[in-house]
Amino acid sequence: MDMSKYREMFLSETREHLDNMNRLIVSLERNPKDLEGINSLFREAHSIKGMAASMGYRRMNSLAHHLEDFLDQFRAAGELPVKVFDRLLAGADLLEQLLEDITAERPERDVDPFIHEAIPPLEDAPLSTEAPEGVAEEPTGEIVNLVVTLADQAIAPSARGILLLKECLLLGHLVESRPALPELSRGGKLKTLGISLQTSCSFAQIESALAGMPDVERIELQETSSEGPVAQRRKDDLERSVRIRTELLDKFINLTGELITNRTMLQNASRLKDWAGMNDGINQLIRLVADLHYQVLQVRMMPLKSITGRLPRLMRDLCQGLGKEIRLDISGEDIELDRSILEKLSDPLVHLLRNAADHGIERSGIVTLRAWREKDLVLIELTDDGRGLNPQLIRDKAIERGFLSRTLAEQLAEADLLMLICQPGFSTRDEVSETSGRGVGMDIVKSSVESIGGILELSLPKTGGTRALLKLPLSVAIIRVLLVQCDGQIMALPITRVQRTLELPREELKRSGRQMVIAFEDEVLPLLSLRKLLKLEPQPERTSVAIVVTEIHGRKVGLMVDQLVGQQEVFVKALDFPLNKIAGIAGATVLGTGQVVFVLDPLGFMDAGHNTEKGEEG
Amino acid sequence: MGFRVLVVDDAMFMRNMLRDVFSRSEDFEVVGEAADGKEAVEKFFELTPDLVTMDIVMPLKSGIEALQEIVAKDPKACVIMCSALGQESLIVEAVQSGARDFIVKPFQESRVLEIARRVVTRA
């Protein structure tokens, strides 16, 4: 794999970590009992080690690993003895020099003399520094990432883990293990052991060497690129910190400056009772806050590519495993989404892809992933040109499994029928295949999409195959809502769920059987009463009715409310247990007045079966 | 015929049990026994067995100390530690000191032989 494009990033990040290390060593020298500082220092060394390993800088890796093990001994004690600081600083300096070597594109200088120097009597972790028997001094080969799973009843699993690592040493150079050796040495439970091994042996060879060990249940190749351990940790880092383009930071500085000016202006106007001036100030503040909001969101935005980037490789591996030829076309990857949305989207996309490859396409075909923006939404569409879901089969299965009665099943529209496969435990394949089909996939896809405020729709295009459409909000935390009033209470609906609002005279409401409907844009729109959904008292008759047109399961529905109050941008907070278990409530927000308002999710109400009787007068 | 084993344990009935296990298999032969760590080291260099089963907790010298002495002089020595359930930290220490594998009391005959075979053939 071509590492050169990551060089710049590697250099700047290592630089950062090194700076942190130096800073920490100096501060620990003044305060050697700072456990948090010791842990941080350990983590810095660990980070450098991982990065160097995946870039192939063996000596930096080896030195960082040595420092990491060195530091690990002191974590338990919570104190750094005086005599170690010289060594730590010398180690950091050597890392610095290695960094210079790498920057200047020179070969890395030798670090063995330093590592083997007489150090204060402390145990050297034998696995890290001594060249094990049978392995050449200079480790060669690719980095292989495996996960070894131990039997549940394994005895002394940590000891077993250590033996596994020792076995690995005979096969190559141990880059990293998760958990690491020092942690294994402390004993305790162990179920899985992740190993990153730089070796010229094939996975099959490694597997046969390790599989003979007692209590080893299974050995799997970890499905990541050769950046394995780094990519995993990178994902964790992703959650704790962000990298910001400096130009964005400059914008923040400027904005802050303007806000300060604005504040002074408002203070003055208030003091002088200058209402015109105050109005100007407030208008300016509105603009500045909008700007700030936008910039903050930019920081959180990442391109879709960050999760779709690995899909071509995944598809390739799937094809190999299934013996099929499938082309994956991706477009619109540059579209940006809030990172928390992207995180939740990753697994569902992978699953949809696997479904398409495994079930959708028989031997060869094309899978298309398309992403684009429409107003406040990002749409992601995944289609395959295979044989498509079979509605009749689904119908039959649903009846057989007791999901629906025959009459209901027959009345169900195609879109709703297809969504049945998202019910837990519903799988129309009798045999469970290796890649998918255990019946746990689609329901998780649906719930993941809904948990980020999105909607999943399945359909069968006329050209054949299956189409999955994900409609996602652009951002999670701050959203625009429609405020409505119902039985004296104000509630909020995300604007992304609102297609239109209407206020109609009562006469326009018609009945169709038991269902209240209205004529709307050449369609007949069924009506639901929000009061009814919320189990509130029916509304006394009014001359006009307020309706919010929304979409539930792909169909337009009119939600009757008492009154439309307005629109606002609010910061939505997720609710904690046990309130988060209430179906139909997506979160809560606090209005400028201090009033707490619940944010509703109409889909949630429907699914919870609150909808016992639709749209009766109420 | 086959691989030569030194059985080390301070309890006679344990030594007997292991002796029986090995004698029932065709590929192993017990050539000696020791009842403490000191004797274990002596007998090891006297008999040069292919395999040692070493109890951990013993008088005079512990199994781990004996293991360390043996491995220091003969890094290729195949020593399997025997321990009672619940002594995981000792097993970890033993493994780090050079034990090739471990078995836990009460023994399962098949497991003992499986591990023993694996250790001697991979030496």
Image: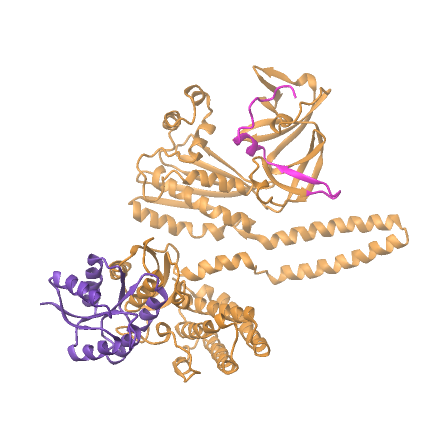
Look at the picture and state if A51 lies above or below A509. below
- Viewer-closest of B56 and A358: B56
- Viewer-closest of A97 and A149: A149
- Residues shaded magenta: A590-618
Q: Residue at x 25, y 81 (%)?
A: B73
**How far across and how far down the image is residue A204, in percent?**
26, 58
**How far across and how far down the image is residue A107, in percent?**
41, 77
**How far across and how far down the image is residue A12, in percent?**
52, 68
The stretch drawn in magenta includes residue A512: no
**How far across and how far down the image is residue A213, in percent?**
26, 60
Look at the picture and state if A376 lies above or below A188. above
Q: How is the image coloured?
A: by chain
The answer to which quarter of the image holds residue A326 is: top left
- Viewer-closest of B78 and A300: B78
Q: Residue at x 71, y 42 (%)?
A: A591
Look at the picture and state if A122 lies above or below A595. below
Chain identifier for the purple-coloured part of the image:
B
Chain identifier for the orange-coloured part of the image:
A
Quadrant (top left/top right/bottom left/bottom right) for the C terminus of chain B: bottom left
Farthest-out residue, left: B1
The answer to which quarter of the image holds residue A588 is: top right
- Viewer-closest of B91 and A500: B91
Farthest-out residue, front: B12
- Residue A140 seen in render: no
The stretch drawn in magenta includes residue A597: yes
- Residue A233 seen in render: yes
Number of numbered discs overlaid on the protein picture = 0
Does A409 sit left or right of A548 as displayed? left
Does A367 sit left or right of A168 as displayed? right
Does A326 sit left or right of A6 as displayed? left
